[in-house]
Amino acid sequence: MLADIESATNAAAADAVKYVPDQLADIQSKLGGLQGSFDKKDYKSVLQDGPPVLSAAQGLEDAATAKKELIARGFSDQWATLSSTLPGNASSIQSRIDFLSKRENKKLASGVDLNEAKSDLSEAETLWTKAQDEQSQGDLEQAVTIAKTVQSKLGAVAASMKLNLAEPAAVTDTST
């Protein structure tokens, strides 16, 4: 029974350590206790306390897989949201930069560092490409992490240009 518990625990350990570490630690602790009882020749305790630990060890892989899938769905949902909003936000910022760059809008552009905005937008677009690459390679966690950085950068650029990304008209004057 101890060997079966250890085998089931070891088989699930790679994912369990990442997705259900508390369950893994609990099983390992109980296995240690069972091993201690066995070493003391307290076989009655091992036979009495072992089956629930074996059952938990056998369910460890399923628990880790379920948690892994739940997290993956969460990243997938976040990616769907980010990938549907970020390109439009970048486009709105580019439109605002183009609008403020026109000579007749010089007054509206006062206090806005257009060169910095262009640079920050370019950096965000480069990061967005990297996020898309990560997503296409199947690393949704990294893709979402990078996309959130892009979201933050775009928000900062928009704020620096007095642009409200929640409004549909990206070139309207929001300085008043």
Image (spheres, helix red, strand yellow):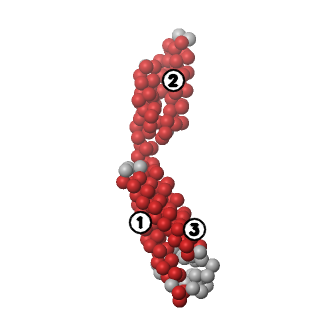
Against 128, is 21 above or below? above
Instruction: Between label 3 and label 2, give the one nearer the viewer.
Output: 3
Which numbered disc covers residue 43? none
Q: Residue furthest left?
A: 136
Quadrant occupied by the C terminus: bottom right
Camera-side residue of 66 and 146: 146
Which numbered disc covers residue 84? 1
Quadrant occupied by the N terminus: top left
Amino acid at circle 2? Leu
Instruction: Between label 2 and label 1, give the one nearer the viewer.
Output: 1
Q: Residue furthest bottom?
A: 104
Residue at figure coordinates x 45%, y 48% from the top left: 71
Instruction: Locate residue 160 relative to residue 5 in the image: left or right.
Output: right
* First-in-chain label (1 vs 3): 1
**In the image, residue 101 lies at what x, y percent?**
52, 81
Compute the Cα span from label 2 to label 1.
48 Å
Q: Secondary structure at mark 3?
A: helix
**In the image, residue 112 lies at what x, y percent?**
60, 77
- The image quadrant of residue 67 is top left
Amino acid at circle 1? Ser
The residue that label 2 is drawn on is: 31
Residue at figure coordinates x 55%, y 17% from the top left: 36
Camera-side residue of 159 and 103: 103
Compute the Cα span from label 1 to label 3.
19 Å
The residue that label 3 is drawn on is: 156
Q: Secondary structure at mark 2?
A: helix
* First-in-chain label (2 vs 1): 2
